[in-house]
Image (tube, rainbow, N blue to C red):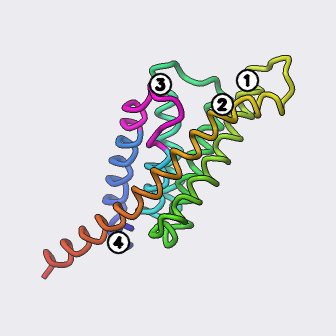
Amino acid sequence: MISRNKSSFHRIAYSAVLIALGVGLGYALAWVPNIELVSFTAVLGGFLLGAGYGLFVGATIFLLYSFLSPFGMAPLPLWIAQGIGGALLGLGGAVFSEHLKKPLYAASLAIAATLFYDVITNAAGYFTFPTKSTFIIYITGGIVFGAVHLLANAIIFALMFPMMIKLVKIQNIIEVNKSR
């Protein structure tokens, strides 16, 4: 949670750093299926900067990563779904910021947000790459991959958010002591 007294310039700078971090972390784990730190970084953006910046940071991370993906850019409907999913992850970080202090709540947010993200991107993928299989078969065919994604994000959020909150508290203490 960045102090509400910070100027717009500071918030924009923090946003840029979080966007670069999120995209970079996306590339760092791009070759590992369904294990990623992009979602965590999007939620962290909302947690640190609030709802408006969280929406922007989350959407921008996902849109930039997908646009510049080493696997090629996603088709437009899927790309838009990824941006919407990222924006909502950022918003979730702001809305549930007080609850992220507890690992169980952080894991719960990860599961709910990842499930939502997976459903909207799988739905967009289905309409982008239509097959002879029905929509339900298309969605259920990815259950194993989705389960790995849900479990990985739950663990990442449960471990990382309590650590990030401690780091923010330490940073706030340092800033207060410097201003004396």
Q: Residue at x 52, y 54 (%)?
A: 90
State yes or no: discs 4 and 1 in contact (Cβ < 8 Å). no
Indicate which disc, 3 or 4, sits on the residue closer to the N terminus.
4
Q: Amino acid at mark 2?
A: Leu
Q: Which segment is the magenta one? A: 23-38
Nearer mark to the viewer, of 3 and 4: 3
Q: Which residue is mark 2?
A: 78
How far from the left and from the top, in percent, is residue 38?
46, 42
Q: Amino acid at mark 4?
A: Ser
Nearer mark to the viewer, of 4 and 1: 1
Frontmost residue, 174 versus 9: 174
Q: Which residue is mark 4?
A: 3
Q: Residue at x 35, y 71 (%)?
A: 3
Q: Secondary structure at mark 2?
A: helix
Frontmost residue, 28 versus 67: 28
Give the farthest residue toward the bottom: 180
Q: Residue at x 56, y 54 (%)?
A: 110
Indicate which disc, 4 or 1, sits on the residue closer to the N terminus.
4
Indicate which disc, 1 or 3, sits on the residue closer to the N terminus.
3
Distance of mark 3 from mark 2, alpha carbons? 13 Å
Distance of mark 1 from mark 3, alpha carbons? 18 Å
Say above or below: 24 vs 55: above
Indicate which disc, 3 or 2, sits on the residue closer to the N terminus.
3
Indicate which disc, 2 or 1, sits on the residue closer to the N terminus.
2
Q: Quadrant of the C terminus?
A: bottom left
How far from the left and from the top, in percent, is residue 57?
47, 49
Q: Which residue is mark 3?
A: 69
Q: Is residue 134 left or right of residue 46?
A: right
Q: Amino acid at mark 3?
A: Ser
Q: Which residue is mark 1?
A: 128
Q: Amino acid at mark 1?
A: Thr
Q: Secondary structure at mark 4?
A: loop
